[in-house]
Amino acid sequence: MKSYLAIAVPELAPRARILAALCAMLPRVGVADDGAFVCDLRGTERLLGAPLRVARNAISVCGASGGQSLSGGLGTTPFVARVAASRTPAGKVSEIPAGAERAFLDVLPLDVLPLDPKVIEELALLGVRRIGELLALPRGSVADRFGQSAAIACALATGELVEDVRGVAPRRRIRAKRIWDEPVDSRERLIFALRAAADELAEALRHDGLAALRLRLVLEREELLPLRLERSLLPPSAESAAIVRSLRWGLEEIPTLGLVTSAALEITAVEPARGRQIGLFAPDGAHAEEAISVAQFLRTRLGPAVVLQPRIVDADARLPERAAEWEEVVR
Amino acid sequence: MGSARANTALAEAIASVEGRFGTHVLAHGAIAERQAAERRIQLGGSLDAQTPGLGSGAPLAFVGGGSAGKVALAHRAAAGAQRDGGTVLWIDPSATFDPLAALRAGVDLTRVFVVRAKTRDDVLLAAGAALRSDGFRLAVVDTGPQLSPSRISIDDLAPLLPIVRSSPAGLLVISDTRAQRLAIPTFSFARVGWAARFGRTTGWTALVAERALFHFAALGADPRDLGTRGALIEKDLTA
C-alpha cells in the first residue's frame, strides 16, 4: 500500500499557499528536510479514494493555488515518495509499488541519500557510486567506516527507518483592514475606528484559543510615508480592550499622525491563551494584570525607582521614615 | 437596507462624538447608570449622604490648606476603592505619601502603586495611563504642599478631565489651592477648631464641602465622622 505522497516544490513557488491548500485537503501534511511537502495518506483510502487519485487531485489543487511545475511521488515510505517526486516531470505523479522500492533506488546515484559530500567522494574512490552498491556492502563495516549518518542513510534506503511526518499547520494570518473614503484626522477617531478591527481580531483569537503576543499596525497616510507600529502585549491577551490600549499607547508616542486613509492590523505572534486565577470575592482582581502592565509601561517611560509600592517593616519605628520600605512594582 | 444605512449613520455619529470628546464617552443610559451605582466609591458617611461621592468616570478635588485632613479622607477613599478588589494608583510628585497613615486608614498597601512622577508631563502620563486602563478603580493625584519644589498646580491637570469621563476609574485630586481655570467638582476643607491636651495639639476639626464635620487626630488615626452641619445644628436646637 502506497501510504505517503510527496510533492516536490520548486524554489520560487508560493509555498505558504501550497501548504494551506494541502492542509485543507489532507489530514497530515509535513515539510521534509529538502523542502518537499510530505502527506501521510495512511488510513485515508476509504474516505479520500485511491492514493493515485488523491495525488493527482493534490497536484491540481496546488496548481490552482499558484504552484506550477509541481510533481508528486507515491511510496511506502516518505523517503521513497520524496525521491520519486523529485525525479518526476512537472505536473505528473509517479508511483513506486510496494516491493519495488529497492529496484527503484538501487540504480540511483548516492547523492540522493542524506550523505555528506565527503563521504560520497570517499565512496566513489572505492568504486561505490549507486545506492544498490552501497546497500550491498556489509552494514556494520559501513557504519564503522563512515559513521552513523551513513548507517541512517542505508536504513532510509532499505525502508528500515521511516521518517516521521510531523503535521505543520499553515500560518494563519489574523488580520483586519479598514479603508476610509474620508481620511481620519485625529488620534481619538482613529482609535475608535480601530476598536472594531480589534474586536474582529479578538474574536478570531478566542475562536482558536490563542492570545496575542505581538501585533503590527500599518497606517497608510496622505502625503506621508506609511507608518508601521509594532507592539508587544504583556501579558499576552485575546481581549479587544488590551489590543486597543496597546495601540493607543503606541499611537500616543507619535507626534504627527497625519491623514490616515487605511489601517491594517495584524497579530504577528501568538501563544496559547492561558486561564487566570482570580479571587472568588474579588471582582476587580481580574484586572490586577492590567494594573501590572500599566506599571510596566510607566517604568519603561519614567525610568526606575518611580513606580513603587510601600511595605511596612516596623509600625512602631521611632522615626517615621524607618516604618516603611519602598519596592519597585515591576523590576 | 434602510436599517444598515441607519446603523452606519449612527456609527458615524458615535465616531464623531467620541472623536471630539474621547472614546467610551457614549454609553447606553441604563447601563451607564447601573455601572455608576455599582462602582461608587464610598468616602465617608456624612459626605456620601450629601453628595453622589466619587464614582468611576468622575473627577473630584479635595482642596484646602495644610493639615486640613484632605489626605486622611483621600486615604479613606482609597480604602473604599479597594473594598471590592480594586487597585489604586497614587501619584505623588512631592514624595509625601505616608504608608503608615494609609495603613491605619484601612488602605491595603499591596494594592497601591505610588508613582513619584516629577514633572507635569510625567504626572499627566501616569494618570492618563491609569485612567485609560481597566486595572485601577481610583487614580489619586496629590499635587503636594504649596511650598514643595516639584509643585504641580491643579490647573495643570486639565488634560485629564476628558480622559476620566470615559474611564472605569475615578480621579481624585488633592491640592492646597483651588483651580482657577478648571471646572472640577471640589470639596473644600476648612479647619474650624483645634483640640489640645497638655498644651500640645492632638487634633483638629474640619468642615468639608461646607457640610460635613470630621475630627482628625494628630497621630494619624482614622478620621472621626462627626456628622453633617445641618444635623448637628438640629441636634443643638432640640437639646
Image (cartoon, rainbow, N blue to C red):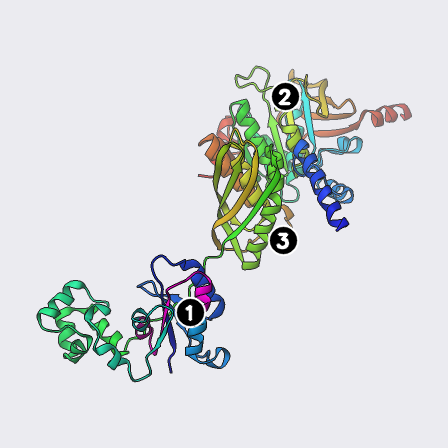
Residue ID at (16%, 69%): A147
Disc nearest the viewer among 3 and 2 = 2
The CA distance from mark 1 to mark 3 is: 56 Å
A184 left or right of A5?
right
Residue B189's place in the image compared with A67, above or below, is: above
The amino acid type, in three-letter code, at marker 1 is: Ile
Say what amino acid the circle numbered 3 marks: Leu
Subunit under mark 1: A
Other-residue count near label 2 (Cα within 10 Å), few / some / many at <14 / 14–19 / ≥20: many
User: Mark 2 against mark 1, which lies toward the viewer?
Assistant: 1
Q: Check chain identity for marks 3 and 2: say if they share one.
A: no
Q: Chain of mark 3?
A: A
Query: Residue shown at 10%/73% (left/top)?
Result: A127
Residue positioned most to the left: A125
The front one of A251 and A45 is A45
How far across and down, in percent of the image, does residue A71 sit? 36, 69
Three-letter code, disc 2: Ile
- Which residue is label 2 attached to? B154
Q: Determine contact: label 1, label 3, CB under 8 Å.
A: no
Residue A199, above or below A123: above
Q: Residue A280: give its label.
A: 3
The residues bearing labels 3 and 2 have C-alpha atoms spaced at a distance of: 39 Å
Residue B11: give x, y in percent of width and height: 70, 42
Marks 1 and 3 share the same chain: yes
Helix, strand or loop status at disc 2:
helix
Residue range (magenta) = A60-82
Q: Verify whether residue B143 appears in magenta.
A: no
Q: Is residue A286 visible?
A: no
